[in-house]
C-alpha cells in the first residue's frame, strides 16, 4: 500500500503464529491458551448516538420519501456506536489501557463532520465502506477508501474535518483515539491507502497496520507515539485465522467489524459490532462464520481496567 509519510511500505504478515508484546518467556502454547481471558462486549452494551445534523454543520435530514432519503441506509445523517464514554455518553467505561475512544461511525451521503479541534491524542481511523475525505489545518487533504488508515498526532493542537462527499452511498469508518506517551507533541498527519496489496495482506492472515514509533525494528506502515499495535484480518467464509498470541503482561481490544467469528479456545462467538477485552497470555484464533469476518485488534500493555457491566 502507498503510505503518506516516511514509513515502511510493506506490512504482509506470514501465515504463522504471531507473538505480541515484550515478554520473552518460553511458555508453552497450552499455557498461553489456558491462562488468559476473553470477555465479550456485546453490541447491546454499546451506546448508540444519533446527533442533530446541525451540530456538525450539516443540512437537516431529508424528509421521508424524497429521492435523497431513498438512498440513505439510516434515517439520521450519523449513527455512531461508542465503546467508551464520549460526547453525551458519560456513564460508560473511560478507556481500556491506552485505548481512550473507539467509535463505529455510519455517515450518510453528502454529510460529515465540520471543522473541529483536537489535541494530545493519537487518532487512528480505519475506513470500512465508502470514501472518507479529510482536510486539516496543516494543509492535508485526501480521500481514502476501504481498508485505508488515516492517522494523526493531534499534539499541541490541530483542526480537521471529515466528510462523505459521495452523493449516493454511505461511509462507515472506525475511529479510535490512543493516549500518547507524552503531551505537547508536534502535530502530524499521514495515511496508508487500502489498495489491492493491502487487501491481499489481510486476506485470511493478520496484517500489522499500526506500531510504536519507538520500535525501530517494527514493520508496521503506520507509527504512533505509544506502545500500541493494531492488527486486521479479513477471513473468507469458514476460514480460520493464524493464532495471534497476546503474551503475558499484554492485553488487547477486539472489534468484529463485519460478519461473525468464533474464538473456539475460549468458547465465544462474535457478531458484527461486538467487541471483546482480551487479557494475555492468550492464543487468539478466530474462525469465520458463513458470511466471513473482518476483525480489528488493538494490542497494548496490560492494565487492570475493563468494563464492569459484563
Image (cartoon, rainbow, N blue to C red):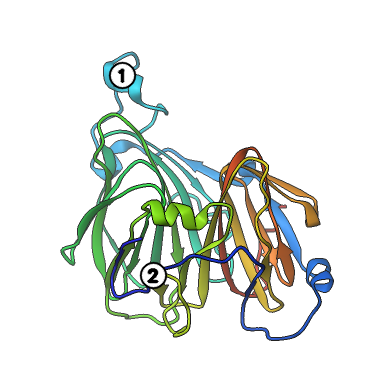
Q: Quadrant of residue 281?
A: bottom right
- Residue 77 point in image, percent of width and height: 35, 34
Position of residue 248 relative to residue 260, above or below, is: below
- The numbered mark at residue 63 is 1
Residue drawn where x is 67% and y is 68% of the image: 17
Helix, strand or loop under label 1:
loop
The residue nearer to you, when weighing 176 against 1, is: 1
Q: Quadrant of the N terminus?
A: bottom left
- Residue 97 point in image, percent of width and height: 58, 70
Residue behind mark 2: 121
The residue nearer to you, when weighing 83 against 125, is: 125
- Residue 63 point in image, percent of width and height: 31, 19
Residue furthest out toward the left: 139
Q: Are marks 1 and 2 in contact (CB under 8 Å)?
A: no
The alpha-carbon separation of the residues under discs 1 and 2 comes to: 38 Å
Q: In this view of the protein, can residue 176 be seen by the observer? A: yes
Lateral position of residue 84 relative to residue 289, left or right:
left
Residue drawn where x is 45% and y is 52% of the image: 199
Residue drawn where x is 43% and y is 76% of the image: 180
Residue drawn where x is 27% and y is 17% of the image: 67
10 Å crowding of disc 2: few (<14), some (14-19), many (20+): many
Position of residue 228 relative to residue 105, above or below, is: below
- Residue 120 point in image, percent of width and height: 36, 73
Position of residue 29 relative to residue 129, above or below, is: below
Lateral position of residue 280 relative to residue 95, left or right:
right
Amino acid at each position: 500500500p502507498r503510505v503518506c509519510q516516511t514509513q515502511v511500505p510493506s506490512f504482509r504478515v506470514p501465515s504463522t503464529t504471531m507473538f505480541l508484546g515484550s515478554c520473552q518467556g518460553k511458555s508453552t502454547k497450552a499455557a498461553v491458551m489456558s491462562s488468559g481471558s476473553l470477555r465479550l462486549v456485546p453490541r447491546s452494551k454499546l451506546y448508540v448516538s444519533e446527533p442533530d445534523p446541525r451540530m456538525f454543520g450539516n443540512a437537516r435530514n431529508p424528509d421521508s420519501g424524497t429521492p435523497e432519503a431513498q438512498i440513505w441506509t439510516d434515517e439520521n445523517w450519523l449513527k455512531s456506536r461508542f465503546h467508551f464514554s464520549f460526547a453525551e455518553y458519560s456513564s460508560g467505561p473511560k478507556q481500556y489501557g491506552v485505548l481512550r475512544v473507539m467509535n463505529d461511525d455510519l455517515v450518510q451521503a453528502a454529510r460529515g463532520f465540520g471543522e473541529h479541534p483536537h489535541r494530545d491524542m493519537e487518532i487512528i481511523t480505519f475506513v470500512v465502506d465508502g470514501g472518507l475525505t479529510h482536510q486539516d489545518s496543516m494543509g492535508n487533504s485526501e480521500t481514502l477508501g476501504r481498508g485505508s488508515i488515516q492517522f494523526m498526532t493531534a499534539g499541541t493542537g490541530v483542526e480537521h474535518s471529515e466528510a462523505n462527499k459521495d452523493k449516493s452511498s454511505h461511509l462507515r469508518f472506525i475511529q479510535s483515539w490512543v493516549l500518547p506517551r507524552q503531551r505537547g507533541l508536534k502535530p502530524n498527519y499521514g495515511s496508508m491507502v487500502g489498495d489491492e496489496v493491502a487487501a491481499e495482506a489481510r486476506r485470511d492472515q493478520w496484517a500489522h497496520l499500526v506500531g510504536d514509533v519507538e520500535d525501530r525494528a517494527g514493520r508496521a506502515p503506520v507509527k504512533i507515539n505509544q506502545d500500541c499495535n493494531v492488527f486486521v484480518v479479513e477471513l473468507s467464509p469458514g476460514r480460520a485465522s493464524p493464532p495471534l498470541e497476546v503474551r503475558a503482561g499484554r492485553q488487547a481490544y477486539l472489534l468484529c467489524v463485519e460478519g461473525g467469528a468464533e474464538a473456539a479456545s475460549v468458547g465465544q462467538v462474535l457478531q458484527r459490532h461486538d467487541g471483546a477485552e482480551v487479557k494475555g497470555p492468550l492464543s487468539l484464533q478466530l474462525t469465520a462464520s458463513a458470511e466471513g469476518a473482518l476483525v480489528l485488534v488493538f494490542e497494548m500493555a496490560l492494565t487492570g481496567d475493563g468494563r464492569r457491566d459484563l
